[in-house]
Image (cartoon, rainbow, N blue to C red):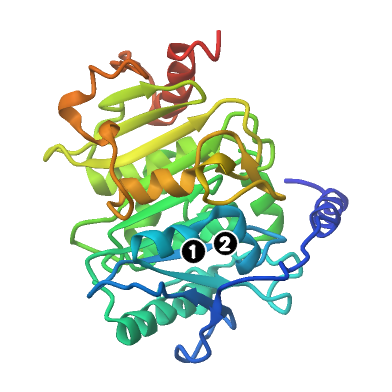
Amino acid sequence: MRSLSDILERLARMRSVNTAVPTFSILKKLDRFGSNPGALTAWHHVPKQLPPAPALVVVLHGCTQTAAGYDIGSGWSALAEDYGFVVLFPEQTRQNNANLCFNWFNAADTRRGHGEVMSIRQMVATMVAEHNIDERRIYMTGLSAGGAMANAVLACYPAVFAGGAIIAGLPYAVASTVPEAFDRMRGQGLPDTRTLQASLRDASHYKGIWPTISIWQGTSDNTVVPKNAAATVAQWRGVHVVPDRPSAIETFDRYSRSVWRDNCGIEAIELYTIDGMGHGTPVDASSGYGGSAPFMLDVGVSSTVEIARNWGLAASFERREPERATTSAERSITPPTPMSGSADIDVQSVIENALRSAGLMK
């Protein structure tokens, strides 16, 4: 466990990051959305041209960020405007957390029916009622503390969401104090796979179809280390009943993508591993959606666009067509190498094997 002085030093560094609110934002405040037990703020954007029964994407910012800042950096509202879906941005307040982190490590905020997860659930219900949202197409994503909180919301309310994307986040229910939170971010003291999977199941005791999960991780992230991505994959493998090893590994110029398919052939879990990327959301300024900012990293691949395509919200492209998966000259697909040992070690090895296949690691 880290010392108190170490924790205070890290918090001070986080507060020093420029958190100036952008002078222009198209987001509008959502004023009424229930009892709001987590005391959060909510913002949203509804495109001018909205189809009947549109989809909804819920987006959670990271520490030191605001909803408006994350929206501009990630490009979610711009993408929603072009493709006709609604976006909702829950926002943390300094009264709840001085660094604007969602309190993913606080049990009072991550239990079904309580705190911040309940506030977010109330926001979603309000958006569904006011904008005739298609309840079969509600999705959740977040960065860092927002990614960990997205995981908590998905765990507590799996019936609400069709899919989730966790960027540089952490597994559900792995910390209950600030010192534990910092240790888990560093990969210290993470529970074993059985405990991780039990925590996810116990959050809601849900018996239906669980959301698909997309996990994004930079190999050079020293704030939330890659062990957390491996642990998140291991946590979600249980409810999706998929093998320890991925069904396929795709390698690209800048990143790799590992996929776990269930017995029906559905891509239940995917893991994007981005070589050399630090802590933040991967963006591609040339895509026209988002751009470089603190914790918004222009690495030539837009997680926003890729995630939206995966959810069927933006124009699809050939990589999502299984019959063409082995014919594209732009990538190679490497069958997973048989591995032995515990499930935790297997998932970590998946990341390393993907990087080796791409020539990004020796």
Front in this rendered view, residue 328 or 106: 328
The residues bearing labels 2 and 1 have C-alpha atoms spaced at a distance of 6 Å
Disc number for residue 149: none
Q: Is residue 128 left or right of residue 21?
A: left
- The reply to whether the C-beta atoms of the residues labelled 2 and 1 are less than 8 Å apart is yes
Query: Above or below — where is 256 with respect to 264?
Result: above
Q: Position of residue 180 (x, y in %)?
A: 66, 52
Q: Is residue 91 left or right of residue 353?
A: right
Disc number for residue 77: 1
Q: Is residue 225 left or right of residue 259?
A: right
Quadrant occupied by the C terminus: top right
Few, some or many C-alpha atoms within 10 Å of disc 2 (few <14, some 14-19, many ≥20)?
many
Query: Where on the picture, by quarter, is residue 79?
Result: bottom left
Query: Above or below — where is 292 with respect to 162?
Result: above
* Residue furthest out toward the left: 264
Name the element at disc 2: helix
Residue at x 49%, y 18% (from the top left corner): 355
Disc number for residue 71: 2
Q: Earlier in the sequence, mark 2 or mark 1?
A: 2
Amino acid type, mark 1: Ser
Residue at x 84%, y 52% (from the top left corner): 13
Query: Above or below — where is 337 with respect to 207?
Result: above
Amino acid type, mark 2: Asp
Q: Position of residue 162 (x, y in %)?
A: 27, 59
